[in-house]
């Protein structure tokens, strides 16, 4: 693990945390003013973008310039696309049922509870999950084939996320589809193309960080945590519980992969 600038990277961890929590605290202030906490979902992608930009500035003179620019660009493209998509999807809607249910359990002030249980928690997750984005920018050596393999995996992930989201948005926009299950396009091959895409994005960014043993060791927790959240935590299981009673969903589950894409069963 020699050659990795541990002191500079450790200092950067503090800057990254400050960036992540600053985004969440600003979002909290806006949410309290609007009376809707669902906008924290928009801040998720923005938080990662802020961490990438702050790290790119802090790592100047430490990491390889090409890798710093590559990782920052990939993170910003993914994060800002996600933020714009979620903002458009939530426009004109009230509070998200997930947050309504959570805040109904608040033992005291609802906003104070939301700050602790939603904003600060998501800020911590942004900091933790972004470790490959931070660590990769401190790797001093030039880009290798592993970085381009990670970039390719990132591109596959962005394709599944962006195309899957666009297909679902078009499907929902048609009144004739009200109450129906989306089982077309990428949704024929996986019940969660957007979550599978997220999975690929973060394993791809991790591969770019793997060009240094030190960087890989310090950041492997990120894709593992993201994979757990998507497959076992607040991603797939929560959505499928919500969809379980929809007519035709049980048949859709029987024929369609739960996560990794494959041809539908007969």
Image (cartoon, helix red, strand yellow):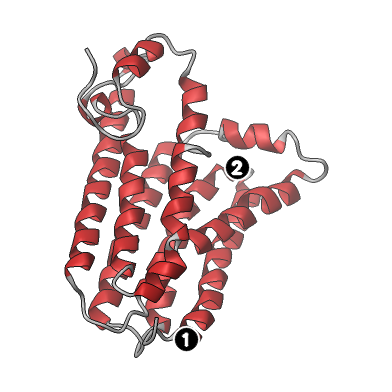
Outermost right residue: 108
Q: How far apart are the two marked residues, 1 and 2, measured between alpha carbons?
A: 39 Å
Taking the image as shown, residue 200 lies to the left or right of residue 243, namely: left
Q: Which mark is residue 8?
A: 1
- Height in image: 263 above or below 116? above
The answer to whether residue 167 is visible is yes
Q: Residue 179: percent from the left, percent from the top?
A: 40, 14
Query: Quadrant where the C terminus lies?
Result: top left
Residue that badge 2 annotates: 36
Nearest to the observer: residue 113 or residue 240: 240
Q: Residue 250: percent from the left, percent from the top?
A: 40, 12
Residue drawn at 42 percent across, 45 percent down = 87
Residue drawn at 79 percent across, 46 percent down = 109
Q: Residue 200: percent from the left, percent from the top?
A: 30, 49
Nearest to the observer: residue 140 or residue 101: 140
Query: Quadrant where the N terminus lies?
Result: bottom left
Earlier along the polypeptide chain: callout 1 or callout 2? 1
- State the image quarter where residue 46 is shown: bottom left
- Height in image: 227 above or below 187? below
Nearest to the observer: residue 204 or residue 40: 204
Task: Nearest to the eye among marks 1 and 2: give it.
Answer: 1
**Crowd rating for badge 1 (residues with CA inside 10 Å; few <14, some 14–19, many 20+):** few
The answer to whether residue 179 is visible is no
Taking the image as shown, residue 31 lies to the left or right of residue 265, namely: right
């Amino acid at each position: 693990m020699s050659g990795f600038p541990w002191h500079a990277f450790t200092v950067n961890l503090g800057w990254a945390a400050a960036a992540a929590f600053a985004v969440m605290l600003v979002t909290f202030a806006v949410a309290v003013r609007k009376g809707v906490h669902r906008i924290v979902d928009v801040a998720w992608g923005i938080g990662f973008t802020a961490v990438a930009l702050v790290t790119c500035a802090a790592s100047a003179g430490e990491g390889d310039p090409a890798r710093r620019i590559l990782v920052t660009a990939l993170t910003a493209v993914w994060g800002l696309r996600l933020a714009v998509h979620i903002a458009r999807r939530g426009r004109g809607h009230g509070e998200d049922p997930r947050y309504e249910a959570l805040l109904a359990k608040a033992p005291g002030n609802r906003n104070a509870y939301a700050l602790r249980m939603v904003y600060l928690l998501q800020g911590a997750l942004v900091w933790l999950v972004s470790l490959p984005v931070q660590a990769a920018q401190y790797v001093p050596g030039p880009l290798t084939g592993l970085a381009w393999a990670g970039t390719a995996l990132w591109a596959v992930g962005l394709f599944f996320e962006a195309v899957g989201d666009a297909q679902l948005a078009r499907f929902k926009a048609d009144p004739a589809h009200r109450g129906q299950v989306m089982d077309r396009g990428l949704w024929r091959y996986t019940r969660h193309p957007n979550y599978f895409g997220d999975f690929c994005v973060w394993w791809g960014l991790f591969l770019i960080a793997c060009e240094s043993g030190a960087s890989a060791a310090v950041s492997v927790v990120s894709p593992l945590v993201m994979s757990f959240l998507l497959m076992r935590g607040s991603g797939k299981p929560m959505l499928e519980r919500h969809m379980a009673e929809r007519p035709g969903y049980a048949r859709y589950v029987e024929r369609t992969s739960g996560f990794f894409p494959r041809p539908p069963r007969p």
